[in-house]
Amino acid sequence: MANLGSSSATKSMKSVKLKFRIPYFTEWGQRLVVCGSEPTLGSWNVKKGLLLSPFHQGDELIWTGTVAVPCRFCCEYSYYVVDDAKNVLRWEMGNKRKLILPPLLQEGGQTLELHDLWQTGGDALPFRSAFKDVIFCKGSTLNIDRPEVILQDKLDQGESVLVHFKICCPNVEEGTSVYVIGSSTKLGNWNVQDGLKLQYTGEYIWEAYCVIPRSDFPIKYKYCKYGKNGCLSLEIGSTRELSIDSSKSQLQYIFLSDGMLREMPWRGAGVAIPMFSVRSEVDLGVGEFLDLKLLVDWAVESGFHLVQLLPINDTSVHGMWWDSYPYSSLSVFALHPLYLRVQALSENMPEDIKNEIRNAKERLDGKDVDYEATMATKLSIAKKVFMQEKDLILNSSSFHKFFSANKDWLKPYAAFCFLRDFFETSDHSQWGRFSNYSKDKLEKLVSKDTSHYDAICFHYYVQFHLHLQLSEAAAYARAKGVILKGDLPIGVDRNSVDTWVYPNLFRMNTSTGAPPDYFDKNGQNWGFPTYNWEEMSKDNYAWWRARLTQMGKYFTAYRIDHILGFFRIWELPDHAMTGLIGKFRPSIPLSQEELEREGIWDFDRLTRPYVRKEFLQEKFGDSWTLIVPTFLNEYLDRYEFKEDCNTEKKIAAKLKSCAEKSLLPESEDKIRHDLFDLLKNIVLIRDPEYARNFYPRFNLEDTSSFRDLDDHSKNVLKRLYYDYYFHRQEKLWQQNALKTLPVLLNSSDMLACGEDLGLIPACVHPVMQELGLIGLRIQRMPSEPDLEFGFPSQYSYMTVCAPSCHD
């Protein structure tokens, strides 16, 4: 907190009454609390904060509360929504409010009314680095002043009201001032030349004091911008109004915090592109970080303000071409060596290496990126330069600064890469005594005394140069007024540095995906382990906070991949290959007791694959008698999958073995598809951890297992299905998002955008709106069912609009 002074330091026993006032609509059982930095307001302990009381005024619900404070009182404070036990349900976004009592209130005995407005996430947008450091950075050249202090002798006791006007206005051109004009003569009677000119006090805030006769109330007013050229820009929206209690005769003091000046908000256009596609005449086989400078120049010439990249973290898990998928991170902190410009590694590049680079450029300069060849070539060249300059670089002050700031992730990353190459696999379960990570083992692995220390340092060296090159490009973008937007993948590869170092943060026996939708009836299975949110919460999501801090070194905005995962994730067992047989986590399951009360009791029938002879004949025709003995056993009037092929991965493995021996009567793909269909012919999914909990299979009405049930069971299960997927989870998912997403948003000052495509729960958009998260709309994927192509003019302001996307 800034040094605003301390109420305990004052020697005066005189006090001032502070009356807090804020309009806010709550739900039943909710209250508002104001909590602040001083003991009077709870010392940031919300349970000890000032509880406010509500009353109705017109269409608004107003919350007020009064507290006595010393005359020289100053503090920071915020508003919170709490339940009856004062547990925090919601809090304001944006900066903490600051209050310093002016000198004229230091005689004591007065009442100061604070008229505040709830700060939403949208109000905090101008303070994000995309605006603060890029779009509106010209505002930093404004001269900071303090509003004129009103002396007590200028006030007409009992006949005047002292009003302190305050407005946030981030986009003010040079030579332009901000005014208040209104119905009072003190506000110019709506004439800007006679209006109240506000002073700029920093952080986009404009303020001024004004003594207004009581007879002028209620007053109507608006804020406006007025340029030297006489150009007037009046804020849009309804006229603001301020009333006072006419029954009180003593002098009143009112501090207004009127939020944002209401004007047509800033809009900008940009381009989204994979980093590997940013090609130039200089690159070696693939787009490189330094090529971003050329892209920024093109963006400026085109009138664009944003450049968005796909993820740029290292994905070198397999050492093959499929590592080119940018959403499967080897490390969420390390940058990808693919984007290194080897020519920039040294100013004294030997001639033989220069020739090697020239030859490689010729060989790799194709239309498509040869991922494996490009990676191998860059690492080979980088190692040669490293061996010549390692002492110079590793002993430099700039490297020491980089290493000190990044060693917490850099050392495990370098050790992982060394072990991956040594064991020829990223599957750390195959690393013997190194399978289980420990800090002691790490320190021994990266010790200077080891024979492989150069191999460790090479990974430090590559990351150092990647950092320098991306930092150069990022600084260039800021200077040119272009927002550089990164991408935060929802998952990490299960064979990654992060799962090795922090296995407790992941549910390694599960897989992440998305439920079926219009585009894929089997859903999606991304293969990433799901997160152990309960474990992550124990250190206030430190791993996530570190990720965002690292991204903030380079980007001024970022895309949250699959933001629905912070409300709930579609969790699949790790033996699944498709995305259909999953459940939401977290979610409220159907309990065995709940189902039994409804007359549902045959859980084996509902949870096991329902396979009848006629189904097999329909799918496999005459070949069914050849397929059944290999994969199924006959059981009463039905068939069951054998133990060695009762999951999708087991079926795929057995089919591959049979195909190699030429034992399959039909194509492997068709048999696999049909067997998977039979395996998924269930109605309920039993929880593998809690056997008395169940989840309805997605689209259960499409299954023959469901169709063969009696009418009572069908009706019950249909009702419970819709309750599970569309009703009972909403509150839980809202609470989950409000617990996790604010931590991300507060971890950096980047502008956050959420990819909110797919099956969207009702709670998602209200939460995103409250937190100031910008959503995504794709014209070719309109959310309206009767619309073929979306209209950007109809989208809300808090929207990134694109004609298409890589999803």
Image (cartoon, rainbow, N blue to C red):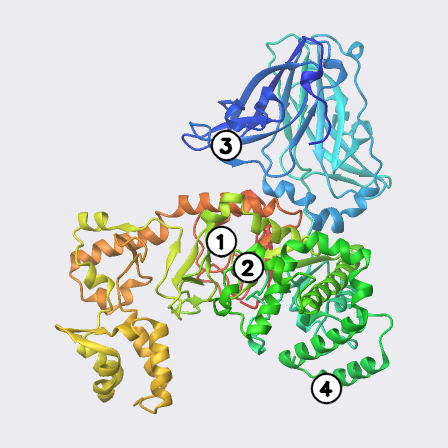
Nearer the observer: mark 3 or 1; the answer is: 1
Q: Nearer the viewer, residue 790 or 369?
A: 369
Cα–Cα span, label 1 and label 2: 9 Å
The answer to whether 535 is drawn above or below residue 578 in the figure is above
Cα–Cα span, label 4 and label 1: 43 Å
Task: Give the residue type at disc 1.
Answer: Leu
Which residue is under mark 4? 363
Local SS, label 1: helix
Local SS, label 3: strand
Contact check, label 4 and label 3, Cβ < 8 Å: no
Which residue is under mark 2? 498
Position of 724 compared to 476: left or right?
left
The answer to whether 378 is drawn above or below residue 198 in the figure is below
Residue 376 position in % (x across, y down): 67, 79
The first of marks 2 and 4 along the sequence is 4
Q: Nearer the viewer, residue 692 or 703?
A: 692
